[in-house]
Image (tube, rainbow, N blue to C red):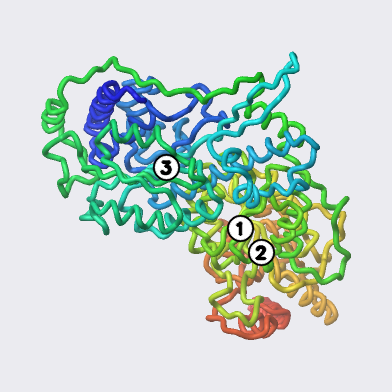
Amino acid sequence: MADTLKLQELAKLIRFYILKMTTEAGSGHPTSSLSAADLATALFFGKLRYDTKDPQNPANDRVIFSKGHASPLFYALWAAAGEISGEELAAYRKFESPLEGHPTPRFKFAEAATGSLGQGLSIGVGMALAMRLDQLSVLGSQLSDKQSLRSSSISLTAGLKSLPVSQLTGQLKTDKPNSDNRKQKTDNRLPMVYVLLGDSEMAEGSVWEACEIASFYKLSNVVAIVDVNRLGQSGETMLGWDTEKYAKRFEAFSWEAHVIDGHNLEEIAGVFDGTLGKAGKPTAIIAKTVKGKGVSFLEDKEGWHGKALPKEDFEKAVRELGEVDRNVKGEIAKPKGITSSQSITSITSSIKKARGTRGTLDTRDTLSYKVGEEVATRKAYGEAIAALGSVNEDIVVLDGEVKNSTFAEIFKEKHPERFLEMFIAEQNMAGVALGLAKRGKVPFASTFAAFWTRAFDQVRMAAISGGNIKFIGSHAGVAIGEDGPSQMGLEDIAMFRSVFGSTVLCPGDANACLQLVSEAAACDGIVYIRTNRPATPVIYRADEEFKIGGSKVVRSSNNDKLTIVACGVTLVEAIAAAEELAQSGVNVRVVDAYSIKPIDEATIKRAAKETGNLVITVEDHYPEGGLGDVVLNVFATDPRVNIHKLAVYKMPMSGKGDELLEYEGISKKAIISKVKSLLMTKKAASDFSRAD
């Protein structure tokens, strides 16, 4: 049982730190931090197992502050543990300090960037899934008949739903003979993931998306701690202090729910020391708290959210806290080892070393398509990721219940233990992908391009977190046809381009897609791959190379009149247009800008220079923020180059793909018409100039 007297002293010290750092900074969220101080103190110094000298140790429990505005509490906890100095605390919210207003991984103990509310539980679910995957790998490696994880039918879903709870929750016990031929117990502890949530963010749908997935996969190593302090930013929360209603909602999602007094340290310690996870379910601790707890003139008062105390009020508040022991130090227990000489960490590490953690695939040796063959790039993605999964065991695939359309089902068939069905919940899928990535997995998450727009907040936060995630958007553009505009991804390039540090790829054929999937896997960071619904001709031979930041000059001559820059479906239209124009004696250059971000500036600039500084861009995307704008940026300081954008300018409708390409002016016929019009105008201008 935890030492509650010491916890009381630590909680008082932590409250002091919260008030001091926010007053010195002149900003922050002290009242939101004070309400959760007792909960977090009991967690950190009574329950948590974490090696502070090795934050990335896979045996560590993980803690995520989904209510990231409570960063003063987060930093105060680490200060109480002796990991942050007073000088560092004094730099809170100051320029270049890692102690930012909302936590980011610039602070070494922050698991991910938080503060955009409603995302922490999804990240925690992803981390818990990664831990479970690692433990299932260990379990598979220990099978007496040496079967592989897959052949033993221990897939992730099967493992979670059919293996004994004693093996998959809390402890994994196996028997191993030692050198004396005696059996020795091996105690492999499955780490826990604790997520602190605010009651305001419980109104976010993404929280409940995470709840249903945690329940579906029986993630008994996830604990949600809800700080129910009644007050949000501008008034009372939806449920106020109705903790029983919160409990019923969690229970409706098949969680184990516990309602407690969030300021009673004995009660808090008791629930932490209780049966967390042992029922084979995720656990919710719903704690009734008081915003501003510990300072009478702040307690349960509106108007104090996000406001630091002025110095005179700080002195008054500190007097209310009473004597604060500045020398008390909180001890965070290290992960429990196992009694044999080999730990779960070393077992997992040996497995990864044997497999190769950054496997890459030269698809030209194992998988390729013949020139002229009709293959959709979405299918090429499915086949590429399945092949890549065979050489890189860290790859996992998530899908938004459209796996038969994205072709992620091919990966599922080959690697069922690493396929995660996320159902129709894209925000949670993006958050889970981040959690997986932060625990060393390489997640590929796929759905229709249009549906990633609803998860944009999660995508941008993943970038702030330094997430290594590959997003796949299929069914892009009007070329999808009859399904109509609600299903057409027409904003996706602009969206992913705007994400910090992102890479955006749009392969023009199946062979290009094969290689770019492998390139994406080897590229750290956020990568977006746009794939097509319709089958299109294979343009490139299997021995062609495709690199991030490159492009392909598909058609050229010494007498090209202008350059057409295209990607994806419109590349096929551009090539067809160029071939027909050539038959009438008009040569144009065609550049495949398959790497949209980063763009191949050198090739495009050279093409423009050699073709009279006349460029047409063609894309199955809205004109704002797409390929055309990228090319415009290339020539932003060169007024000699004339850029003409062909894009989706009209609101699309249902119809055949070819009809819609024609309607939007991005078909072969439309490209030919635009080329002839520009060349005619250029000739007229030249004739007029000579007449002068």
Q: Which residue is mark 2?
A: 403
Residue 479: image quadrant is: bottom right
Classed neighbour count for the residue bearing mark 3: other residues with Cα under 10 Å, few (<14), some (14–19), many (≥20): many
Do callouts 1 and 2 mark residues in contact (Cβ within 8 Å)? yes
Residue drawn 23% across and 40% down? 31
Q: CA distance from mark 3 to mark 2?
A: 30 Å
Which secondary structure lies at badge 2?
helix
Residue 421: image quadrant is: bottom right
Q: Is residue 277 above or below residue 625?
A: above
Q: Which residue is mark 3?
A: 195
Q: Is residue 479 above or below residue 32?
A: below
Q: Is residue 376 above or below residue 467?
A: below
Give the label on residue 131, or none: none
Q: With 649 as the anchor, is 418 left or right in this view?
A: right
Give the label on residue 421, or none: 1
Which amino acid type corresponds to the residue marked 1 in the rendered image?
Glu
**Residue 505: image x %, image y %?**
66, 57
